[in-house]
Image (spheres, grey):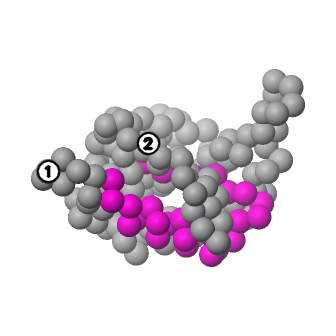
Amino acid sequence: MRVVLQRVMHACVKVEGEVIGEIGKGFLILLGVAETDTEAAAERMADKICKLRIFEDEEGKTNLSLGDVGGEILVVSQFTLYADCHKGNRPSFIGAGAPDKAERLYEYFTERCRRYVGKVEHGSFGADMKVELLNDGPFTLVLEGDERGIRA
């Protein structure tokens, strides 16, 4: 599982010009699912993200979690995170999970985040989406993990 996580002041996702998911302060999560991913990997990633302490406290140190600041989450599926550009100039997406499996784990991940956060919005799996955000910091993390652990 691969994630690009952006700390945002606000973000929204649109399909055909209509907003289908919108949040205030929190995390925009671009989520890629690999063919080898499992529910255990999705649980571990959601748990890690929701507990990350990357919001500033009163002393300006990144010491507060999403829950500490009343943050929200917007999850957008992003199979292109598994692009392989080693050969030629056209990316291959062979490492991305099959659509049915990827959609199931995307939904599972989103539900897992709801255990920690009051408002979790999401995009439309497989749709042509437009994402707008105001990055806070900017503060962006790239995470990769499986059922064994998370790497940044």
Residue lying farthest right? Answer: 87
Q: Is residue 36 magenta?
A: yes
Instruction: Name the residue tied to disc 2.
Output: 140
Q: Is residue 129 left or right of residue 92?
A: left
Q: Residues within 10 Å of mark 2 (few under 14, many from 20)?
A: some
Q: Which residues are magenta?
A: 28-55
Q: Nearer the viewer, residue 67 or 100?
A: 67
Residue lying farthest left? Answer: 58
Residue lying farthest top? Answer: 89
Q: Secondary structure at mark 2?
A: strand
The number of discs equals 2
Q: Is residue 93 left or right of residue 51?
A: right
Q: Which mark is residue 59?
A: 1
Residue type at mark 2: give it: Thr
Residue type at mark 1: give it: Glu
Q: Residue at x 53, y 47 (%)?
A: 142
Q: Work out whether mark 2 precedes mark 1 in sequence or the reverse, and give the earlier one.
A: 1
Q: Is residue 16 magenta?
A: no
Quadrant for the N terminus in the image: bottom right
Q: Nearer the viewer, residue 39 or 17?
A: 39
Q: Residues within 10 Å of mark 1 (few under 14, many from 20)?
A: few
Q: Residue at x 46, y 66 (%)?
A: 48
Q: Secondary structure at mark 1?
A: loop
Q: Residue at x 40, y 65 (%)?
A: 50
Image x and y of residue 51, in percent: 38, 66
Up-down: is 116 above or below 73? below
Q: Nearer the viewer, residue 151 or 27?
A: 151
